[in-house]
């Protein structure tokens, strides 16, 4: 089953939707599931504290004028994806590492928790 989850995760990274939901990915990430079996610690970046990523997001916003970080933007893009997944869990009353305080801080800088609906039926550009 672990191999199946890893295969599904890789497919999701390529945009192929399958039985592995964003909610399930968030749950697996919260318990420390390793989606990248076989990669050495030198290849994978070590997790950074939430405050440090938040500061990176502020820098991104200063440079680009918005907080919509592409998922392909490396570790910051992955972190943003995790915040959105955590927010969905928070709103559903399910366990998550994203606290109400962190969600408020993200909201205060214009963070978009549902970027997909922001661009629904539109070209993905920010004006």
Image (cartoon, grey):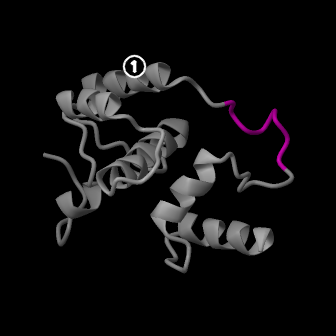
- 123 or 119: nearer the viewer: 119
Residue under the point 34% across and 55% down: 88
Residue that lies at the very extreme toward the left in this rendered image: 127
Q: As displayed, is residue 72 above or below residue 62? A: below
> Any magenta on residue 41?
yes
Range covered by the magenta-colored residues: 39-46
- 17 or 92: nearer the viewer: 92
Q: Position of residue 41 (x, y in %)?
A: 81, 35
How many numbered marks have been drawn onto this rendered protein structure? Answer: 1
- 86 or 48: nearer the viewer: 86
Q: Quadrant of residue 65?
A: top left
Q: In which quadrant will I find the N terminus?
A: bottom right
Q: Is residue 79 left or right of residue 36?
A: left
Q: Residues within 10 Å of mark 1 (few under 14, many from 20)?
A: few
> Any magenta on residue 104?
no
Residue that lies at the very extreme toward the bottom in this rendered image: 18
Residue under the point 54% across and 80% down: 18
Helix, strand or loop status at disc 1:
helix
Q: Is residue 8 left or right of residue 73?
A: right
Q: Quadrant of residue 60?
A: top left
Q: Position of residue 110 (x, y in %)?
A: 19, 34
Residue under the point 82% across and 55% down: 37
Q: As displayed, is residue 79 above or below residue 13? A: above
Residue under the point 20% across and 68% down: 120
Q: Position of residue 115 (x, y in %)?
A: 27, 54
Q: Is residue 87 left or right of residue 125?
A: right
Residue carrying label 1: 55
Main secondary-structure element of the magenta-colored stretch: loop
Q: Position of residue 122 (x, y in %)?
A: 17, 67
- 99 or 18: nearer the viewer: 99
């Amino acid at each position: 089953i672990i191999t199946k989850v890893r295969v599904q995760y890789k497919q999701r990274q390529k945009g192929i939707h399958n039985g592995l939901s964003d909610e399930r990915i968030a749950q697996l990430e919260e318990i420390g599931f390793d989606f990248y079996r076989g990669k050495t610690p030198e290849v994978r970046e070590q997790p950074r504290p939430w405050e440090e990523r938040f500061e990176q997001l502020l820098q991104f916003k200063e440079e680009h004028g918005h907080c919509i970080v592409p998922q392909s933007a490396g570790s910051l893009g992955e972190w943003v994806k995790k915040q959105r997944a955590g927010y969905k869990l928070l709103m559903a009353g399910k366990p998550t590492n994203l606290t109400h305080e962190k969600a408020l801080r993200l909201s205060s800088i214009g963070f978009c928790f549902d970027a997909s609906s922001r661009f629904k039926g539109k070209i993905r550009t920010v004006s």
